Image (cartoon, helix red, strand yellow):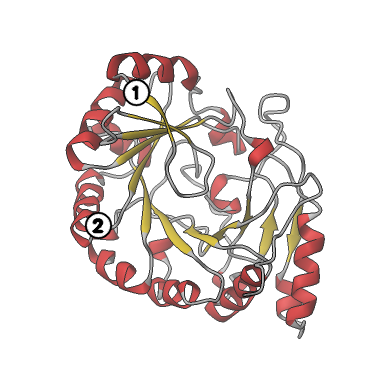
Amino acid sequence: MAQKPLLHDRFGRTIQYLRVSVTDRCDLRCTYCIPEHFKGFEEPDHWLSADEMERLVGVFAQLGVSRLRLTGGEPLTRKGLPDLAGRLAALPGVEDLSLSTNATRLASHARTLKDAGVSRLNVSLDSLRPERMAAITGRDCLDDVLAGLMAAKEEGFAPIKLNMVAMAGVNDDEIDDMVAFCLQHGFVLRLIETMPMGETGRHAGFLDLQPVKARLRDRFGLVDGVLPGGGPARYMMSPDGQFSIGFITPISQHFCDTCNRVRLSVDGVLYLCLGQDESFDFKPLLRSGASDDDLAAAILSAIDLKPLRHEFREAPEKVVRIMAKTGG
């Protein structure tokens, strides 16, 4: 069997994880993500079509990318997503297909997504209190999210990871409640530090997760652990292995040295780093008759643009685009 190719950046990091945004639109307005009255979404005519996404992702897979995550905005707002997921899951070289969602529409899509080949889910859930969830997301949505979670659990997705953006003075008093909820249902909890992306991200109530991590380690007797997925979280788990918690700490303890991912936006722009502006636009190539070899050469050139690290702490006002523009 021929050895699988590996895609390396100029700092020697292996790039094997592609996050594909299928829309920049969302049915929520989380305070740390999309500004309440934001109107600057891409027009659907500017989006990559399903065929264009499948073709470009296929070339990435030929170059060694084996993990895909479908993101947004909210990916379940894009029509035909289960069909696209099935096409991407079937591409040669793709070994893992996951989905990030706010779960407001998950109850009606869980089965079709599972049948399409999505194996793992990351679900955004920042509070278990209806009024607080509405204040964070701009909508009374907690019941819908919980219904989606239970439907996903019933369909056998594993693992199901709950992403909680921990914010000082907003929801940091609920961390232990979220631990208990995840213990009850067998979910993996991931605590995430806010990132200064756009005005919303810069004013979201940053919480250093290092003291939180130490407190939870002592309270629950947690030990260092690992969990499959290829992402940036550092995990701890209970001694019996029944509970895992991850910490995504781009500010207090960045993970740039091991970064293995790039992000493709819905309009075909490849972003090489959340915290930098380096990017490459693939849409002109896709729409001007470029061959697969041309696309492969462009991917190699684009990967060479990947910077060594972000500057969220040193230059928090540097990135003006919002998270939904980049792709979650």
Q: Is residue 150 above or below residue 195?
A: below
Q: Earlier in the sequence, mark 2 or mark 1?
A: 2
Which percent across, then down, holds residue 275? 67, 39
The residue labelled by disc 2 is: 152
Please tell me which residue lies in front, 240 or 303.
240
Q: Specify the amino acid type for callout 1.
A: Leu
Please tell me which residue lies in front, 111 or 61.
61
User: Relative to residue 202, is residue 104 drawn left or right?
Assistant: left
Q: Pointer 2 and pointer 1: residues touching (CB < 8 Å)? A: no
Which percent across, then down, holds residue 75? 43, 61
Q: Is residue 18 above or below residue 62?
A: above
Which percent across, then down, holds residue 221? 31, 19
On the image, which quarter does residue 245 sit in? top left
Residue at figure coordinates x 75%, y 74% from the top left: 295
User: Relative to residue 21, is residue 15 drawn left or right?
Assistant: right
Q: Specify the amino acid type for callout 2.
A: Ala
Q: Which mark is residue 49?
A: none
Residue at figure coordinates x 59%, y 34% from the top left: 199
Mark-to-mark CA distance, 2 and 1: 27 Å
- Helix, strand or loop at mark 1: loop
- Helix, strand or loop at mark 2: helix
The residue labelled by disc 1 is: 222
Label 2 packing within 10 angstroms: few (<14), some (14-19), many (20+): many
Which percent across, then down, holds residue 135? 33, 34
